[in-house]
Image (cartoon, rainbow, N blue to C red):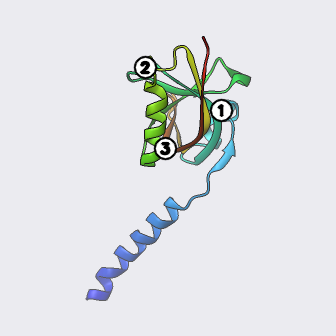
């Protein structure tokens, strides 16, 4: 009886471990925008520019296809990475007005055609953050 009850729990733990160890797909914002279905529900790694109004709207963009962005939301984030990104956004004037924040972002991409935002990355971690003044 105990053995049969433990089997589903063991399977669940294995699935969680596999999901956490999923290797990110190295790609670009441009590639994601061009073919979002290919990346749907996948963990992606992108080098991008972070944009934010400092209140509620944040996105990632790539200068190579600057007219399109991918929304970025808080996911099960690395606390230190989230703190570093928050510090960069709120250093000086909140948001990215007057500054550029670049880095490498890893998260799970979701595509929901017809919904807003239709393209979204739930942030897991951010690294190599560089802040540069545009003034």
Q: Which one is in front, 17 or 128? A: 128
Q: Please identify the residue farthest to the top as the structure is shown.
A: 135
Q: Residue at x 47, y 26 (%)?
A: 89
Q: In which quadrant of the rendered view does residue 36 lie?
A: top right
At mark 2, the secondary structure is: loop
Residue 135, image x, y percentages: 60, 11
Q: Residues within 10 Å of mark 1 (few under 14, many from 20)?
A: many
Q: Earlier in the sequence, mark 2 or mark 1?
A: 1
In the image, taking residue 7 as reference, residue 22 lies left or right, namely right
Reading the image, the residue beneath label 1 is 29
Give me the disc on residue 81: 3
* In this view, 127 is above or below 3: above
Mark in front: 1 vs 3: 3
For the point 69% across and 30% down, the residue is 30
Q: Is residue 114 visible?
A: no
User: How far apart in space, not on screen, are marks 2 and 1 (Cα)?
Assistant: 24 Å
Residue most extreme to the right: 64
Query: Which numbered tag is attached to residue 94?
Result: 2
């Amino acid at each position: 009886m105990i053995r049969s009850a433990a089997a589903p729990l063991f399977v669940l733990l294995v699935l969680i471990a596999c999901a956490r160890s999923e290797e990110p797909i190295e790609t670009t914002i441009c590639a994601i925008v061009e073919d979002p279905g290919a990346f749907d529900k996948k963990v992606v790694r992108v080098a991008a520019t972070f944009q934010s109004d400092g209140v509620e709207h944040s996105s990632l963009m790539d200068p190579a296809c600057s007219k399109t962005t991918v929304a970025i939301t808080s996911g099960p984030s690395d606390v230190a990475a989230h703190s570093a990104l928050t510090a960069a956004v709120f250093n000086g004037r909140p948001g990215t007005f007057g500054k550029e924040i670049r880095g490498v972002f890893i998260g799970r991409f979701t595509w929901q055609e017809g919904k807003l935002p239709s393209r979204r990355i739930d942030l897991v971690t951010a690294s190599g953050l560089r802040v540069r003044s545009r003034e």
